[in-house]
Image (cartoon, rainbow, N blue to C red):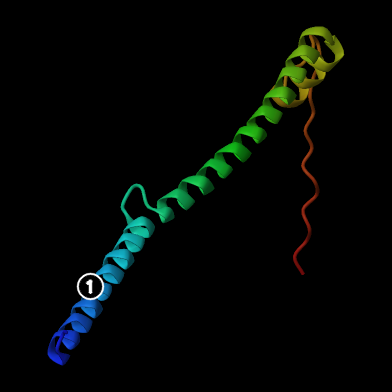
């Protein structure tokens, strides 16, 4: 039969073993959360970045469709081409003159 001293030593060894096991588990969980370059926080950051890039990609695709439609219209519609040339680039037809008037200035009182 085990003596009282041996039983207390076994209990103390079991407590130490459980403490060390719990410490290893806690360390492992902290490593999973904070490991540089591969931890859970890094995973969340990458997931957020993927979401942002996907949204930007959608915006760029929509802009690309708009520009493609604008190009098709410029190639096929002469009136639209003339309108764009006049408004955006300030082009004129032959024998046209542009008069620019400044708005009247307010008098100081």
Q: Looking at the rendering, which quadrant does residue 92 occupy?
A: top right
Q: Which residue is mark 1?
A: 17
In this rendering, the answer to whether 14 lies above or below 64 is: below
**Residue at the front extreme of this rendering:** 1
The quadrant the N terminus occupies is bottom left
Q: Nearer the viewer, residue 105 or 71?
A: 71
- Horizontal relation, residue 43 to residue 19: left or right: right
- Horizontal relation, residue 3 to residue 39: left or right: left
Q: Residues within 10 Å of mark 1 (few under 14, many from 20)?
A: few
* Residue 101 x %, y %: 79, 37
* Residue 7 x %, y %: 19, 86
Q: Looking at the rendering, which quadrant does residue 24 occupy?
A: bottom left
* Residue 95 x %, y %: 81, 11
The quadrant the C terminus occupies is bottom right
Q: Nearer the viewer, residue 108 or 77?
A: 77
Q: Nearer the viewer, residue 58 or 9?
A: 9
**Residue at the image position 66 percent from the left and 28 percent from the top:** 61
Figure label count = 1
**Residue at the image position 58 percent from the left and 43 percent from the top:** 51
In this rendering, the answer to whether 2 lies above or below 31 is: below
In this rendering, the answer to whether 24 lies above or below 71 is: below
**Residue at the image position 82 percent from the left and 8 percent from the top:** 76
- Horizontal relation, residue 69 to residue 10: left or right: right
């Amino acid at each position: 039969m085990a003596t009282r001293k041996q039983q207390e030593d076994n209990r103390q060894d079991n407590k130490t073993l459980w403490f060390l096991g719990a410490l290893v588990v806690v360390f492992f969980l902290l490593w999973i959360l904070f490991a540089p370059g591969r931890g859970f926080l890094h995973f969340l950051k990458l997931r957020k970045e993927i979401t942002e890039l996907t949204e930007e990609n959608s915006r760029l695709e929509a802009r690309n469709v708009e520009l493609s439609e604008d190009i098709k219209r410029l190639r096929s519609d002469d009136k639209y081409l003339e309108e764009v040339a006049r408004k955006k680039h300030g082009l004129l037809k032959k024998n046209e003159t542009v008069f620019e008037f400044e708005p009247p200035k307010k008098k100081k009182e």
